[in-house]
Image: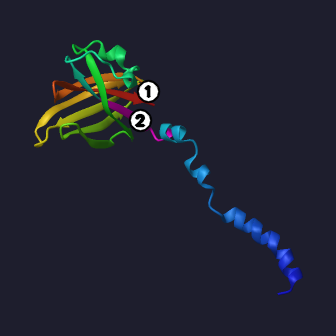
Amino acid sequence: MKTTSIRRLLPLALLLSALTAAPPAIAEGGNKASSEQRAGRVTLVMPVVYATTQHSRIDPQLKNLVRYLRNLRYTGYELIDTKRVVLAPKGSDSYTLAGNRKVRLDLLSKEEKRVRVRVQITGAKGMKLLDTTIWVNRNGTFIVAGPKHKNGVLVLPLTARY
Protein backbone atom coordinates (compact mmCIF):
# COMPACT_ATOMS: atom_id res chain seq x y z
CA MET A 1 0.00 0.00 0.00
CA LYS A 2 1.24 3.43 -0.85
CA THR A 3 1.78 6.13 1.77
CA THR A 4 -0.93 8.24 0.14
CA SER A 5 -3.53 5.46 0.61
CA ILE A 6 -2.58 5.01 4.28
CA ARG A 7 -2.97 8.75 4.90
CA ARG A 8 -6.47 8.64 3.41
CA LEU A 9 -7.56 5.59 5.41
CA LEU A 10 -6.05 6.66 8.72
CA PRO A 11 -8.83 9.16 9.67
CA LEU A 12 -11.47 6.54 8.82
CA ALA A 13 -9.68 3.90 10.93
CA LEU A 14 -9.41 6.31 13.88
CA LEU A 15 -13.09 7.18 13.62
CA LEU A 16 -14.13 3.51 13.52
CA SER A 17 -11.94 2.63 16.49
CA ALA A 18 -13.39 5.53 18.47
CA LEU A 19 -16.95 4.42 17.72
CA THR A 20 -16.35 0.77 18.63
CA ALA A 21 -14.07 1.26 21.63
CA ALA A 22 -15.34 0.61 25.16
CA PRO A 23 -16.34 3.74 27.06
CA PRO A 24 -13.78 5.11 29.46
CA ALA A 25 -13.75 3.69 33.00
CA ILE A 26 -15.14 6.89 34.47
CA ALA A 27 -18.27 6.52 32.34
CA GLU A 28 -18.79 2.99 33.66
CA GLY A 29 -18.34 3.85 37.32
CA GLY A 30 -19.73 7.35 37.15
CA ASN A 31 -20.60 9.01 40.42
CA LYS A 32 -20.37 6.29 43.10
CA ALA A 33 -23.09 7.76 45.33
CA SER A 34 -25.59 8.15 42.51
CA SER A 35 -24.92 4.67 41.11
CA GLU A 36 -25.48 3.20 44.60
CA GLN A 37 -28.74 5.14 44.92
CA ARG A 38 -29.92 3.90 41.53
CA ALA A 39 -29.14 0.33 42.54
CA GLY A 40 -31.13 0.73 45.78
CA ARG A 41 -28.06 0.32 47.94
CA VAL A 42 -27.77 1.44 51.55
CA THR A 43 -24.58 2.25 53.45
CA LEU A 44 -24.70 0.75 56.93
CA VAL A 45 -22.18 2.19 59.37
CA MET A 46 -21.70 0.42 62.70
CA PRO A 47 -19.13 1.78 65.17
CA VAL A 48 -18.09 -0.74 67.81
CA VAL A 49 -18.07 1.16 71.11
CA TYR A 50 -16.84 -0.13 74.47
CA ALA A 51 -19.10 1.34 77.18
CA THR A 52 -18.12 1.22 80.86
CA THR A 53 -18.81 2.78 84.27
CA GLN A 54 -15.12 2.45 85.22
CA HIS A 55 -14.30 5.97 83.98
CA SER A 56 -15.99 8.99 82.41
CA ARG A 57 -13.81 9.56 79.33
CA ILE A 58 -15.57 9.83 75.97
CA ASP A 59 -13.53 9.12 72.85
CA PRO A 60 -13.45 12.34 70.74
CA GLN A 61 -14.18 10.25 67.63
CA LEU A 62 -17.64 9.59 69.08
CA LYS A 63 -18.70 13.26 69.20
CA ASN A 64 -21.48 12.67 66.61
CA LEU A 65 -22.91 9.85 68.73
CA VAL A 66 -22.73 11.42 72.21
CA ARG A 67 -26.40 12.48 72.08
CA TYR A 68 -27.37 8.82 71.71
CA LEU A 69 -24.85 7.42 74.18
CA ARG A 70 -25.89 9.77 76.99
CA ASN A 71 -29.19 7.91 77.21
CA LEU A 72 -27.38 4.78 78.35
CA ARG A 73 -26.34 4.06 81.93
CA TYR A 74 -22.60 4.11 81.16
CA THR A 75 -20.19 6.99 81.72
CA GLY A 76 -17.15 6.13 79.58
CA TYR A 77 -17.09 5.32 75.87
CA GLU A 78 -14.21 4.19 73.67
CA LEU A 79 -14.34 3.59 69.92
CA ILE A 80 -12.86 0.16 69.17
CA ASP A 81 -13.62 -0.12 65.46
CA THR A 82 -16.01 1.03 62.75
CA LYS A 83 -17.61 -1.33 60.26
CA ARG A 84 -19.01 0.09 57.01
CA VAL A 85 -20.84 -1.96 54.40
CA VAL A 86 -22.88 -1.10 51.32
CA LEU A 87 -25.76 -3.49 50.78
CA ALA A 88 -28.63 -3.88 48.37
CA PRO A 89 -31.95 -5.14 49.73
CA LYS A 90 -31.69 -8.87 50.55
CA GLY A 91 -27.91 -8.43 50.90
CA SER A 92 -25.89 -9.36 53.95
CA ASP A 93 -22.43 -9.04 55.44
CA SER A 94 -20.72 -10.32 58.54
CA TYR A 95 -17.58 -9.57 60.50
CA THR A 96 -15.83 -10.33 63.76
CA LEU A 97 -16.26 -8.18 66.87
CA ALA A 98 -14.04 -7.86 69.93
CA GLY A 99 -14.11 -10.99 72.05
CA ASN A 100 -14.24 -13.23 68.94
CA ARG A 101 -17.95 -12.58 68.43
CA LYS A 102 -19.54 -12.35 65.03
CA VAL A 103 -22.08 -9.82 63.74
CA ARG A 104 -24.22 -10.41 60.70
CA LEU A 105 -26.25 -7.62 59.10
CA ASP A 106 -29.04 -8.45 56.64
CA LEU A 107 -30.72 -5.60 54.76
CA LEU A 108 -34.25 -7.00 54.59
CA SER A 109 -35.97 -4.07 52.90
CA LYS A 110 -35.58 -0.45 51.94
CA GLU A 111 -38.35 2.14 51.92
CA GLU A 112 -38.21 5.82 51.11
CA LYS A 113 -37.91 6.83 54.78
CA ARG A 114 -36.46 3.76 56.51
CA VAL A 115 -34.78 0.39 56.17
CA ARG A 116 -35.37 -2.91 57.94
CA VAL A 117 -32.22 -4.64 59.14
CA ARG A 118 -31.74 -7.97 60.89
CA VAL A 119 -28.85 -7.90 63.38
CA GLN A 120 -27.43 -11.19 64.64
CA ILE A 121 -24.58 -11.54 67.12
CA THR A 122 -23.07 -14.91 67.95
CA GLY A 123 -20.56 -15.74 70.66
CA ALA A 124 -17.15 -17.34 70.30
CA LYS A 125 -18.65 -20.85 70.35
CA GLY A 126 -21.42 -20.02 67.88
CA MET A 127 -24.04 -19.43 70.58
CA LYS A 128 -26.66 -16.89 69.51
CA LEU A 129 -26.40 -13.77 71.72
CA LEU A 130 -28.77 -11.51 69.78
CA ASP A 131 -31.14 -11.96 66.88
CA THR A 132 -33.40 -8.98 66.25
CA THR A 133 -34.96 -7.06 63.40
CA ILE A 134 -34.96 -3.27 63.60
CA TRP A 135 -36.18 -0.31 61.57
CA VAL A 136 -33.61 2.44 61.02
CA ASN A 137 -34.76 5.80 59.69
CA ARG A 138 -33.08 7.13 56.57
CA ASN A 139 -29.82 8.79 57.72
CA GLY A 140 -30.81 7.89 61.28
CA THR A 141 -29.14 5.81 63.99
CA PHE A 142 -30.45 2.92 66.09
CA ILE A 143 -28.50 1.81 69.17
CA VAL A 144 -27.93 -1.90 69.64
CA ALA A 145 -26.46 -2.49 73.12
CA GLY A 146 -24.80 -5.81 72.94
CA PRO A 147 -22.67 -8.34 74.69
CA LYS A 148 -20.54 -7.93 77.78
CA HIS A 149 -16.96 -6.84 77.18
CA LYS A 150 -14.28 -6.35 79.85
CA ASN A 151 -15.93 -4.24 82.60
CA GLY A 152 -18.83 -3.08 80.45
CA VAL A 153 -20.60 -3.83 77.20
CA LEU A 154 -20.22 -3.32 73.48
CA VAL A 155 -22.59 -0.73 72.04
CA LEU A 156 -23.30 -0.86 68.32
CA PRO A 157 -24.92 2.33 66.92
CA LEU A 158 -26.19 1.38 63.46
CA THR A 159 -26.63 4.23 60.96
CA ALA A 160 -28.33 3.78 57.59
CA ARG A 161 -27.32 6.26 54.87
CA TYR A 162 -28.97 6.59 51.51
How is colour applied across the structure in the image? rainbow
Q: Is residue 60 left or right of residue 143?
A: right
SS type, badge 2? strand
In the rendered image, which quarter contains the N terminus?
bottom right
Q: Is residue 44 left or right of residue 55?
A: right
Q: Is residue 29 left or right of residue 99?
A: right
Quarter-of-image position of residue 154: top left
Quarter-of-image position of residue 86: top left
Q: Is residue 60 above or below residue 21?
A: above
Amino acid type, mark 2: Val
Amino acid type, mark 1: Glu
Residue topped by disc 2? 42
Q: Is residue 62 magenta?
A: no
Quarter-of-image position of residue 143: top left
How far across and down, in percent of the image, does residue 79 sit? 32, 28
What residue is shown at x 86% (from left), y 76% (from top)?
A: 7
What residue is shown at x 32% (from left), y 19% (from top)?
A: 58
User: Callout 2 environment at 10 Å: few (<14), some (14 to 19), or many (20+)?
Assistant: many
How far across and down, in percent of the image, does residue 135 sit? 31, 25
How far across and down, in percent of the image, does residue 74 sit? 23, 16
What residue is shown at x 33% (from left), y 42% (from top)?
A: 91
SS type, badge 1? loop
Of residues 111 and 37, the one nearer the viewer is 37
> Residue extending furthest bottom?
1
Q: Which residues are magenta?
A: 38-48
Residue topped by disc 1? 112
Q: Is residue 139 left or right of residue 128?
A: right
Of residues 17 and 94, the one nearer the viewer is 94
Q: Earlier in the sequence, mark 1 or mark 2?
A: 2
How far across and down, in percent of the image, does residue 107 sit? 32, 36
Inter-mark Cα distance, 1 to 2: 11 Å
